[in-house]
Image (tube, rainbow, N blue to C red):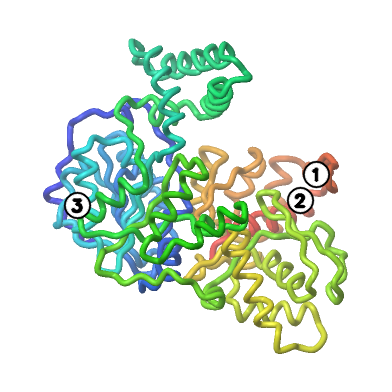
Amino acid sequence: MNVQTEHCHPTTVSTPYDDVYYPGHVYGLTHPNHLATIATVYGMQPAPVEHCRVLELGCGVGGNLLPMAFQYPDSEFIGVDLSGVTIERGQRNVAALGLRNIKLLHCDIMNVDASFGQFDYIIAHGVYSWVPPVVREQMMTIFKQNLAPRGVCYVSYNAHPFSHLRNMVRDMMLYHTRHITGMKEKVGQARAIMKFLSEGSKANSVHGAVMRDQCNRVLKVPDELLFHDDLDEGAAAFLLSNVVEDATRHGLQYLSDADFSRRYLAGYAEEVRATLQRFPESEFMARDQYQDFIDGNGFRRTLLCHDNISLRRQIDRDFVTRFHLLSTLSPVDPGVCLTDDSAMEFENHDSSRITVTNPLLKAAHLCLGRAWPRAMSFGELLDGARALRGGEQTDDDQQTLTDAMYILTQSGEVSFLVSPPFLMKDVTDRPQASLLARRQAETGPLVTNLLHQTVQLEDDRTRHFLQLLDGTRTTDQIVMEMTEKFGPTTRIEQTGGAGQPAEPQQLSTQEGVARSLAMVGKLGLLVA
C-alpha cells in the first residue's frame, strides 16, 4: 500500500458510533464494478475494477469495503472513519482474513489531503447528510483533489422532497427525547411517541396518513439505524440540485444516479413520460430533479466525475451487447414449450414476474437463470438461447435479443456489468466457499456473497455446513461430518407451487448436502 498517512493522526474525539455500533453492510451500488459500468454507459473509460484504487469516507467497520478487497487482491482499498472503536473492530476482521490490500484508518475526514494520492473510485455512503457543513465542504474538496482523472465518485444523502415528511416526525421524536441520552431508552421513547401521535391523529386527514406511514417506517427501522440516522440532531437533507451546485463549484459534474433503472420511464403516465423525455442532454440533472419531485424521492445516490470529461447521454439500443448480463429469472412452469409462441412466465428474486412468448427470448431467460450467479456475455447468451431453442438461426435473432435486453436492463430485471464479476465455479469434489463468508458465518446469519450482496443463512445447520466448505473436504467427508453432528436425515424446506405453503421434506444427509451445495452455488458463495 503506497498511501501516505503521516497527516492522518488518530483523533481522541469520541463519537456516538464508539458507543452505539452501526452495523456494517455491503451496498451494491457502491461497488467499483457497478460504478465503472455506469461510467462506461455514459462514454467514460474508467479504471478496470481488477486494478484500481478505492477510497471510502466513513467506512465504519469496513463491512462494505472489506468484501471488495477480498474479491480484488490486485486493487488497493483505503477506508477512513472517525470512530476508533469501529476501526479497531474492522482491523481485526482484516487481519483475520489476511488481507494486505486494504487499510482502515482511524482518521478525521478533515485530515484527508493530497498525500493520500488519487483514487479511481471514491465512496461516501451515509456520511454527507450526517456531518457539519465544514466537513461537507471538505468532502467535496476530497472528491476533486483525490479523484483520478477518469475517476468516479459516489455520494449518498437524505433528499427532498420526501425528507420534509421525515424531518417533520424527526422533530417530534427529538423534542420528546431531548433529555434522554441512552440509546435503548431514546429509541424506545421515539417509537412510543410516534405510535401515540399517529394513533391520535385523524385517519381521514392528510396529516394522519403521513403520520401513520412514518410511524410504520420508524417501527421497522433497526435500533442502531434509528438512533444514528433519524435521531441525529445535525442531520440535513438536500435537493439533488443543491449537491450538484456544490460539486460544480469544486470542478466536478453530475454523472448520473447510481441506480440505472431510474432512467426507465415506462411506469409513468404518458404525458409525464413525454415531458421528461423532452429534456435536452444539457439538462440531464434537471430531468432527474423533476423526477425526484414526481416520485417523492427521499434518498439520493449521486455519481460525480471531473467537469472536463465529455459525457454521452444518448444510449444506443445495442449498448447491451458490450456488457456481461446477469439475472435471477426462473420459470414458474419449466414445462412450457420453447418452440412456439405459448406464454411462459418467469419470476425474479424479488417475486416480480414477466411473461415471455417469443421462443428465442424464452430460451434466453432460461439461459440467464441457469447461469446465475455467473454472468454471460451477449454473444454467449445469444448462442446459448439459439441452442436451447433449436431450429434454424434467423437474421432477426440478434436484434430480437438486443431489443429485449435493452428494455430489461433499463427496468432493472436484468443486471449488466462492464467486467465479469468475481468468477464462481461449479461444485467440485472438494467444494470451497468464500473465506469471507465462512468467517462471517462463525458469528451470525448474515454473510456477503461474491456479487457484493448480503445473504441470510437460514439456521445453525446451514452456517455449520458453509464452514465445512474450506476446499479440504470431499463431499463424502462433508456428508459424514454433517451426519455426525445433525443425524442421518436433514429437514429441507421445499417451496410449494404458487399460493401453496412450503412443506418440510426429510432427506438423507447425502441428498441434503447435494441440495445445500447447489443452494450455496446459487447464492454466489462458491469461490473461483
Question: What SS does tag 1 mark?
Answer: strand
Classify the position of the C terminus by image quarter.
Answer: bottom right
98 lies above or below 528: above
Q: Is residue 95 left or right of residue 427?
A: left
Label 2 and label 1: CA atoms lie apart by: 8 Å
Q: Is residue 100 visible?
A: no
- Contact (Cβ within 8 Å) of mark 2 with mark 1: yes
- Please name the residue shown 43% across and 57% down the image: 31
Q: Earlier in the sequence, mark 2 or mark 1?
A: 1
Q: Amino acid at mark 3?
A: Thr
Q: Residue at label 2?
A: 512
Q: Nearer the viewer, residue 223 or 318?
A: 318
Q: Nearer the viewer, residue 25 or 86?
A: 25
Residue 86, quarter of picture: top left
Task: Using a 10 Å C-alpha cutoff, classify the residue at mark 3 as few (fewer than 14 neighbours), some (14 to 19) or many (20 or more).
Answer: many
- Residue 386, horizontal then vertical, whole percent: 74, 81
Q: Amino acid at mark 2?
A: Gly
- Residue 205, horizontal then vertical, whole percent: 59, 20
- Please name the residue shown 58% across and 47% down the image: 455
Label 1 and label 3: CA atoms lie apart by: 60 Å
Q: Is residue 41 left or right of residue 350?
A: left
Q: Earlier in the sequence, mark 2 or mark 3?
A: 3
Q: Amino acid at mark 1?
A: Thr
- Please name the residue shown 69% across and 41% down the image: 485
Task: Using a 10 Å C-alpha cutoff, classify the residue at mark 1 as few (fewer than 14 neighbours), some (14 to 19) or many (20 or more).
Answer: some
Q: Earlier in the sequence, mark 1 or mark 3?
A: 3
Q: Which mark is residue 141?
A: 3
460 lies above or below 170: below
Q: Which mark is residue 333?
A: none
